[in-house]
Image: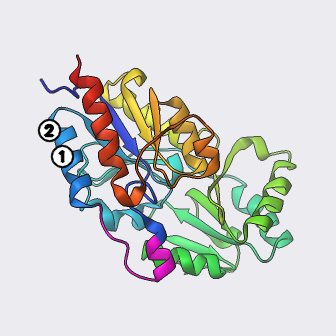
Amino acid sequence: MGKFDGVLLASDFDNTLVYTERALRSGTELQPPSRKTCEALEYFMAEGGRFAVATGRALPAFARYAAGIPMNAPCVVCNGAVLYDFARGETVEAALLEGEVRQRVQTVLDRFPEVAAEAYHVNNVIYAVQPNEATRQHEHVTRVAVTEAPSLPDVPLPLGKILLEGAHAVLEEALAFLRMQPWAAEYELVFSQPHLLEFTAKGADKAGMVRRLAQRLGISMEHVYCVGDESNDLTMLAAAAQGFAPANCAAAVRESGATIVAHADEDAIAAVVEILDQKYGKK
């Protein structure tokens, strides 16, 4: 038996497992996790631990990097809307956006024409409505081209997530407008980056899907640890036995009480594994 038997570690991808910001600023290709991080994860799994990525990315935007990441559990994608098993190549669970969602979010785009929307279809197609500079930046980081659509009602269902993109100040106004709608309580609304506002079905957040993953693996939440850097990670950090954050995390994450470790560019995940190694090594 390994020291990490019955332990689950779930980590955000962008600016946590890998440092995306450098690629965004320089226009270069996103680099895979470092050798040190990979070795730490391989050690964690060899000792019985289960590791999963929990990302806001759509499946096609994360799939190209999945093969280069040591992991042995299904991953949370679309900010908690989908649990996907890369080993089997299949969706395990999904909490989808259906019904009137397209018409409802279209009212936001009509009111704020400078805001773009990316709609993540379950068939791994990303549709974009009134794409803007933020959309193009997102395409560069994810290396996945969007398929443009004239409006959200023209996008086919079912959808895992809708991502609103634009200047933070404008998205704050859009969020306030959304929260005023009588149907707002039917959805999860959270920032994953200052220029990215996530829109998923109620209960479809990272915490909810990490809980479902732990249940599937037969792991108690007392032995679930999560790592993340942004506001959309707060729910899973709070749900974990202990939440961790890289030193480059957003202020809201730092203020949440998460344990701050190394910068994402300095092997934050390896630092988390070292802490867990000390904790479980005492048993």
Q: Amino acid at mark 2?
A: Ala
Q: Secondary structure at mark 1?
A: helix
Q: Position of residue 72 (x, y in %)?
A: 24, 44
Q: For the C terminus, which image quadrant? A: top left
Residue at 60% from the left image edge and 69% from the top image edge? 118
The colour scheme is rainbow
Residue at 85% from the left image edge and 50% from the top image edge? 181
Q: Is residue 164 visible?
A: yes
Q: Is residue 74 visible?
A: no
Given residues 23 and 251, the one toward you in this image is 251
Q: Position of residue 28 (x, y in %)?
A: 40, 81
Q: Is residue 27 magenta?
A: yes
Q: Position of residue 101 (x, y in %)?
A: 70, 56
**Residue 146 versus residue 217 in the image, above or below:** below
Mark 1 neighbour density, 10 Å: few (under 14) some (14–19) many (20 or more) = some
Q: Amino acid at mark 1?
A: Glu
Residues tagged 2 and 1 counted as in contact (Cβ below 8 A): yes
Question: Could you tell me how many numbered marks the image carries?
Answer: 2
**Residue 264 versus residue 156 in the image, above or below:** above
Distance from Cα at disc 2 to Cα at disc 1: 6 Å
Give the residue at mark 2. Answer: 46
* In the displayed structure image, the side of residue 66 where residue 222 appears, left or right: right
Q: Position of residue 166 (x, y in %)?
A: 70, 71
Q: For the N terminus, which image quadrant? A: top left
| Magenta residues, start to end | 22-33
Given residues 59 and 53, the one toward you in this image is 53
Question: Residue at the top extreme?
Answer: 283
Given residues 267 and 219, the one toward you in this image is 267
